[in-house]
Image (cartoon, rainbow, N blue to C red):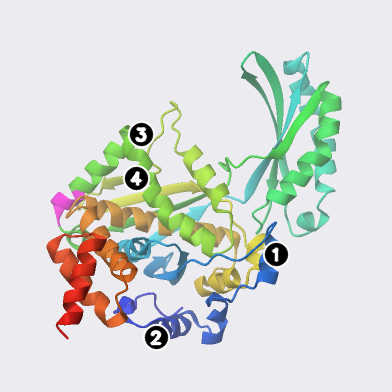
Amino acid sequence: MTSSRIPGFRDLTVEQRRQAVAEQAGLAVADLAALDPGGFSLEDAATMSENVVGAFSLPVGVAANLVVNGRDVLVPMVTEEASVVAAASNGARMARALGGFRTSSTGPLMQAQVQLVDVVDPLAARLRILEARDELVALADAQDPRLVEVGGGVRDLVVRVVDADGERYVVAHLVVDVRDAMGANAVNTMAEAVADRVAEIGGGRAVLRILTNKADLRLARARAVCDVQTLGGRRVVEDMVHAYKLAAADPYRAATHNKGIMNGVSAVVLATGNDTRAVEAGAHSHAISPEGRYTSLSTFEKDADDNLVATLELPMPVGLVGGATATHAGARAAVAMTGVRSAAELAELITAVGLAQNIAALRVLAGEGVQRGHMSLHAKNIAVAVGAGPDEVGPLVERLVAEKAFRHDRAEQVLAQIRGAR
């Protein structure tokens, strides 16, 4: 990667942007052909889902300006909302002045649960199952010798007793290092393989045997320092911190605050062929505080120089092998664009994008407010919807924004005036 800073990127044509991305990412332009409409065939679609009747396309945008651990990165984002890509690029630009994003992550540990019911002595059953740890680990690892061969496999066995509505369940967790896979298939297979033996040892009946999407042992973290002057001064920094503090204290604000983070996260997860639902479920479960309150996923504070310090920690169960990442040509092209080499590196990049998104959102909220940018983009959608041509969209949007008239009927009137003036 030469540089993720491409001045005037948004003003280029699609072909010019593709050429710029290919040059900066060290790819051939042809490597991005899989991102073309129709690049994903119906035959490929039929292998990925059931009852397939077609394929649904969404725009692939590229977020610029990101520096992660000293490396410039261009990031593919699949989203229908233009402001998401713009915000990620803008947040990355704000962080860039003081070095961009620093990231870290834990090991790629996923968990599968085996639930036992009808256990007469659950506390003693818990200990019996733990005593059989070596046997159960060996049985689970035997289900995926290839994973063990590449350094993965079961790392621990945890057994919990869970009280629920008058029932007392024994729940065994297999903690599995899934390496560069997302890991759902591997851990589910292991859970099913050990379930009968766990039930026999525990003296109960196995019901559920499936992974948990609360991937709290597979975390990715990102932090950034944004220069106070780049953000617009001390008052802006203080107001961004105020906005964060409300999100930390108030679940009504936290829901929208975290949704903004996930705008960026989900767009990159989808672009790279990973499971958006699993990542979103894990993220929102991670937003529950120890006291049981839904709160902010990120944190914002000032440093001694009045600069803004932003941090984010997320469960990030994403992979580079298996699933759509392996079978979808567009996902492979998206991964190639980023230059990442491991699932951990991808997880950290996605978390950095989520934080960039969050920084940009709070900067807007602490300044002119969200509607100005959103309504400009909305005006463009309206212009296209009423039939404006490529040379008519710009003048029409300019008029709608100036009038603050974001209605189809007014757009039709203005478009008629523009055409009449010619």
* Kind of residue indicated by mark 1: Ala
Q: Earlier in the sequence, mark 1 or mark 4?
A: 1
* Kind of residue indicated by mark 4: His
Q: Is residue 56 above or below residue 179?
A: below
Q: Earlier in the sequence, mark 2 or mark 1?
A: 2
Residue picked out by circle 2: 16
Name the foreground residue: 236 vs 322.
322
Label 4, label 2: how many angstroms apart (C-alpha)? Answer: 34 Å
- Residue 113 is drawn in which quadrant? top right
Residue picked out by circle 1: 46
Q: Residue at x 45, y 82 (%)?
A: 18
Label 1, label 4: how many angstroms apart (C-alpha)? Answer: 37 Å
Label 2, label 1: how many angstroms apart (C-alpha)? Answer: 33 Å
Q: Earlier in the sequence, mark 4 or mark 2?
A: 2
Q: Residue at x 62, y 59 (%)?
A: 319
Q: Is residue 322 visible?
A: no
Nearer to us: label 1 or label 3? 1
Q: Is residue 37 above or below residue 165?
A: below
Q: Earlier in the sequence, mark 1 or mark 3?
A: 1
Quadrant of the image containing the C terminus: bottom left
Q: Is residue 47 left or right of residue 234?
A: right
Q: Is residue 243 visible?
A: yes
Residue picked out by circle 3: 251
Region of the chain picked out in magenta, as a range: 233-237
Nearer to us: label 2 or label 1? 1
Residue 93 coordinates in the image, percent (x, y): 30, 66
234 falls in the magenta region = yes
Residue 138 coordinates in the image, percent (x, y): 84, 43
